[in-house]
Image (cartoon, helix red, strand yellow):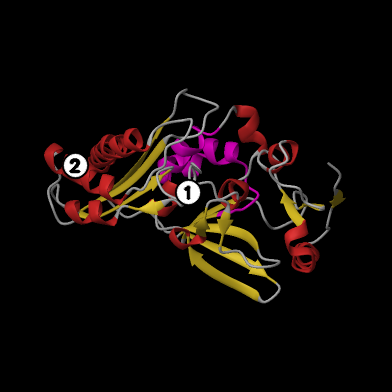
């Protein structure tokens, strides 16, 4: 397989090249996904556009407006960031489940999201946190919610020449916490059979759930919100039994497939189990 290696010096140059070559070009950031796909001949781009050296697409910033993650920020940086561990530990928790340390040192947030795998480990916690994606392209800038970013397996809402620039996460609410649970055959170097993220926010006093967001991965064509499960919990004092009920609702919202990693029936059952566990874990953390 032969391809032409293109290394733009600026983002505008990269976007123009991508817009003019569209289906012929693929972006190279960390390379942990695209190079494997090229080697396995699952993708055969004519041009490989290296954006790793383009300035302004990496880094972590946090202020009163929340968290901003550049698309070229490595997974390992997210995993080990002190501010993320303090303010958004669910993101560090999810990042730690991806591949090996070597993979996390190369792989980027943007790559994990733009590869658009239904099992992308960073997608579910970002959806549960209410994150948004800032997209740059030849026509300017636009913002979409992470919940709307995915269009199907391997597909996003990015148009010709558009690039994911950064992900913005709102500031954490008082008495809120999240949890991400990934089920896989192994504890490392494996794709999720099921992934569930939950973010629970309690009222200022007491144990009543003021808000909750639950996101599911690897059980539908795209990562998705389990809104029926959220409705069961919102406004209630969450008990073990209520968390079980929420898990059953999440099972109804999932539409898993059978593949080499698990049957549809097994995945659906595990959605119920993992949703219950994630909700209860987030609830316990929100109480502290």
Q: Is residue 164 magenta?
A: no
Instruction: Work out whether 121 lies above or below 162.
Output: above
Disc marking residue 265: none
Q: Residue at x 66, y 65 (%)?
A: 162
Q: Where in the figure is residue 157, as x and y percent of width and height?
A: 56, 64
Residue tagged 2: 243
Q: Residue at x 36, y 44 (%)?
A: 197
Q: Where in the figure is residue 224, as x and y percent of width and height?
A: 39, 53
Q: Where in the figure is residue 39, as x and y percent of width and height?
A: 75, 36
Residue sitting farthest toward the top: 186
Residue tagged 1: 123
Of 108 and 25, the residue lying toward us: 25
**Quarter of the figure with the N terminus:** top right
Tag 1's secondary structure?
A: helix
Look at the magenta stretch and give its main secondary structure.
helix
Residue stretch in magenta: 69-98
Q: CA distance from mark 2 to mark 1?
A: 22 Å
Which picture quadrant has residue 239?
top left
Q: Name the N-terminal-most of marks 2 and 1.
A: 1
Q: Horizontal placement of 270 versus 202: left or right?
A: right
């Amino acid at each position: 397989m032969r391809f032409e290696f293109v290394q733009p010096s600026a983002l505008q140059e990269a976007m123009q090249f991508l817009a003019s070559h569209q289906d012929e070009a693929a972006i190279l950031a960390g390379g942990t996904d695209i190079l494997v796909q090229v080697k396995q001949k699952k993708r055969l781009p004519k041009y490989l556009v290296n954006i790793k050296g383009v300035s302004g697409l990496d880094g972590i910033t946090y202020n009163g407006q929340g968290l901003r993650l550049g698309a070229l920020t490595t997974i390992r940086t997210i995993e080990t960031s002190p501010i993320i561990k303090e303010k958004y530990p669910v993101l560090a928790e999810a990042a730690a489940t991806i591949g090996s340390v070597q993979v996390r040192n190369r792989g980027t947030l943007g790559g994990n999201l733009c590869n658009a795998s239904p099992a992308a480990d960073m997608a579910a916690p970002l959806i549960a946190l209410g994150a948004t994606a800032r997209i740059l392209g030849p026509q300017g800038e636009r913002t979409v919610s992470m919940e709307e970013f995915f269009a199907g397996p391997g597909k996003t809402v990015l148009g010709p020449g558009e690039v994911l620039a950064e992900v913005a996460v709102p500031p954490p609410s008082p008495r809120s916490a999240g949890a991400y649970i990934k089920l896989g055959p192994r504890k490392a170097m494996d794709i999720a059979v099921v992934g569930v993220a939950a973010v629970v926010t309690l009222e200022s006093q007491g144990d009543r759930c003021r808000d909750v967001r639950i996101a599911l991965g690897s059980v539908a064509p795209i990562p998705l919100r389990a809104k029926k499960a959220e409705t069961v919990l919102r406004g209630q004092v969450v008990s073990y039994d209520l968390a079980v009920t929420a898990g059953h609702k999440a099972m109804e919202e999932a539409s898993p497939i059978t593949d080499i990693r698990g049957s549809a029936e097994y995945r659906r059952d595990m959605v119920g189990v993992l949703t219950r566990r994630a909700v209860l874990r987030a609830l316990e953390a929100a109480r502290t």
